[in-house]
Structures are given as structure tokens and as C-alpha cells.
Image (cartoon, coloured by chain):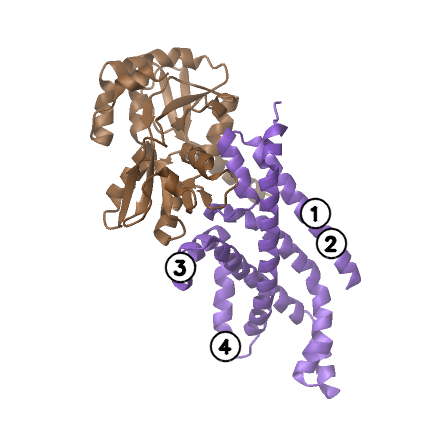
Chain colours: A brown, B purple
Amino acid sequence: MGIRKKWAMSALVAFLVLSMVGCGSNNNAKSGDAAEESIKFASDASYAPMEYMDTDTIKGFDIDFIKAVMEEAGIDYTVTNTGWDTMLSSVKQGTEYQAGLSSVSITDERKETYDYSIPYFESTNMIMVKEGSDIKNALDLKDKTVAVQGATTADDLMSGIMGVDNTKLRRFESNAVALMELKGGGADAVVADIAIVNEYIKNNPKEKVTGILDKENFGSEYYGILYPKGSEWKAKLDPAIKAVIENGKYAEIYKTWFGEEPDTATLLSAE
Amino acid sequence: MDFRFDIIVHYLPVLLKGTLFTIGVSIVSILCGSILGLGMGFGKMAPKWYFRWPFHSYINFFRGTPLYVQILIVHFGVIPLFYGTTNVLMTSFVALSLNSAAYSAEIFRAGIQSIDPGQREAALSLGMSKWQAMRFIILPQAIKRMVPAFGNEFIVLVKDSSLLALIAAPEIMYWSNTMKGQYLRIWEPYLTAAFIYFILTYSLSKLLNYIERKV
């Protein structure tokens, strides 16, 4: 084995180390001493405006919210963009990442595998159609082609209405592709979280699309922080979440992202 | 380890439908891809550079860009151009066929060029036409050499068809993603998908071994 091979090996190792550092933490609240406990959040930052990447920085409502919570709790933390699947598997193990922060809706089926924090966000799903569509509410979607992001509550709701094995219900990797499918004419409607739909309409004013709210068929749902089963972090962070919602910090962050007052009374009673 | 067979059983019917979709799309794409590829392989061997050039560019483009990107381009760019709207079934066939054609073309070309030129010269000196020499002397020998490479291409195509989940084509990976979404569990869907793909490609390679012995 010559010098060349060794050189190649060290270059490879250096590359791997560098890429790990590069993909690593983005958002240190404060760099306290190492003895203090800290928590690492995994997130799928492809869900603007809730969490998204602005080049190499993670931003969004959830990110500002968790900052307020961790300041309240006085605990160090990082939020890392890991993608959805890595988040699910690593949070379940709870060793590398102890929690998931990614607008995860609280459902009974998911509670079989994970623990959740108290609800921190109220959302509902919204239908997006092209202008002039004859779709008026969720039940009109029954025999239409509907695009959703797979693994979301929009998927659950539409699976309930259309049947889980209905091929007219089309599940995409991300909301972005689902929205493109509506634009391309391959779908009659997209169902997604209200924040996503509003963000899309705001960013694409020239596209003739409208959002339809159907509170009757799409009830409220709540986002929670995802923990492994039996996590001790739930007990530590729940009071801080509650405090942030009660002391007005939450409403402040909410207003900067959505331009309106949150309904904190409903949120606190939602548990 | 808690491995939940009940959710696999729950999803088995749609996974089987997805398997049929995968098999169907793969067979059609392999056929279209080979026919297209045969033409392109000859095109690339054309003596004049300006005749060769379009085939050359085509092959370089489809071999030089990821199928992932090609699927998106075909789905959102090419199909709407001809079809008016996006169409998932058309995209599945077209994207995989075009991709497979580029690889098949190279397999054909390599197979044909691997036959010693003396064979062709001998055929021509016997009074055969160029076409007869190709049809009766070169191709039969070349095809024997192409079979293993084609087998490889078939297997790769079956596995690559999983990328169609990106545009929500109802194939195996799509349904296992759906399973993942409903339960937020990843091992059951992924291992099930891996198992199905393995069964498909393993039986395919057995079949190809058999054909290889027969040819």
C-alpha cells in the first residue's frame, strides 16, 4: 500500500467528517456548558411556512416556537433537518434525536408508536382547486382525482372519504409535487394544511387557484412534538409549552408568521 | 423487536396490485426500450457523423442524468406537451422506455461490434447482401453475447421503477409509502417492499439464466 492509497483514505475520512459537520446542527439557543442536559430535535424541513430550509438555515413557525419554549425551560437544544423518514426512525429509538419537531399531527394510530407533547398548534386541512371548479366541499372530491402529500392527515382524511386503495387518491412525496400536479392538470384538487395552501396562493398570485375551507368534513387537528414511547422529555417540556402559550409569546410568534391572532383558548383545552 | 405483521396483512391486497403495476410497466418499458434501443444502436454506428450525432446525444443525455430527474422532466414537461395534462401511466411507460432505450442501444452496439469484422467480410464474399450478413451471420452471434447484459438491464429497470413513487404511480414503493404514512412505522413497509422486489428480480434472474443456457 503506497502513500497514494493512504492519502486517498485520509481525504475520504476528511470528506466524511466535513459532510457530517456540514449537515449537523443549525440552531443553538445558547452554548451552555457540556454538563447541562440538552435535547436534539429532528425535523423534516420541507413544510413552509411551518419549517423549511432557507439555504442552510432552518426557519419557520415551529422553529421560532421551540426557541421560545426552550428559553422558557432553560435547556440547550438543536434542530436538525433530517428528512421525514430519518426523523421517524431516530425519534423512535430516541438515542441520537430525542424528539421530532415537524408539524406532526396527533392521531390515535400514531400514538401506538410514539408519545406526543401537549398540542401546540391548531390546524385544519383545506382544499385547493383551480378557479371555476365545481368542487365546493370535501364530499365533492369523492370521485375526483385528488393529490395529497403522503403520510399526512390530508392523506388520512381523503383515504377515509375515497378509500385507502383508491388510485384516484394520489399520494406524493411532498406538497410541492402535489401542487405541481394540480397545475399540470393531473389532479382536480389538492388537499393540504391550511398554512401550506395559503402560503402557496400567496406566493403564486398569477395562478388561478382558490382554497376551500370545509370545517364540517375536515375538523381541527393538532400538532404535537414527537417523543419516543415513555420519554422523560414530555414531562420536562409540557409545562414550558403551556407557559409560552399562556404568557403571550406564542401569540406574538403566531402573528409574525400568519398575521392573525391564534385561538389559544381552544388550543389549551384541546388535550 | 416489535414487528407488526398485521399491518402488512392489511396492506397485502394493494401491495399485490402495486406488484402487478410494477411488472406491467417493466415489461412494456423493456419491450419499447429494446425496440427503440435497437434503432438507436444502429444509429450510433452510422458512418456519417451528422447522422450519428443525434443518437449519440440522446444516449449521453439519458445515461448521464439521473432517472429521478428524467421522470420529473417527462411528467411535468414532456407529457403535458403531447397530452394536454400530466398523466401518470404515460409518464411511467415513457420515462422508463426512454431511459432503458439508451442503455439497450449501448448493449446492441457493443454486442454487434464485438463480432469479428472478418465474419461480415466472409458473409459478403459469399454473395450475401449487407442486410443478410447482419440478419443471418452477425445478429445471431451478437444476441448470444447480449443476453447477460440485457438481463442485467431488465433487473435494473424493475428496481428503478420504484422511483415512479415520486409522481404517485401506484406501484410497490408507493403503497409501502402509504403504509408508512398511516402508521408512522418504517420497517414493516420498507422490508416488505424489499422482499417483493427481491422475489421479482430473483425470479427474473433465474429465468434469464435459463434463457442464457437455451440461446
- What residue would you read off at disc 3? B80
Q: Is residue B40 visible?
A: yes
Q: Badge 4 local density, few (<14 within 10 Å), some, or many (20+)?
A: few
Q: CA distance from mark 2 to mark 4?
A: 37 Å
Q: Residue at 46% x, 29% y: name it.
A: A87
Q: Please determine if labels 2 and 4 lie on a single subunit.
A: yes
Quadrant of residue B86 in the image? bottom left
The residue that appears at 71% across and 49% down in the rendered structure is: B203
Residue corresponding to mark 1? B202
- Of helix, strand and loop, which one carries label 4? helix
Do the residues bearing badges 1 and 3 touch, measured as CB atoms within 8 Å?
A: no
Question: Label 2 sits on what residue type?
Answer: Leu
Q: Quadrant of residue B40?
A: bottom right
Q: CA distance from mark 1 to mark 3?
A: 36 Å
Which label belongs to residue B51?
4
- Counting every numbered tag in the picture gives 4
Residue most extreme to the right: B214
Name the N-terminal-most of marks 2 and 3: 3
Q: CA distance from mark 4 to mark 3?
A: 29 Å
Label 1: which secondary element: helix
> For the residues carrying marks 2 and 4, which lies nearer the camera in this image?
2
**Is the same chain shared between marks 2 and 3?**
yes
Real-space Cα distance between discs 1 and 2? 9 Å
Q: Which residue is mark 2?
A: B207
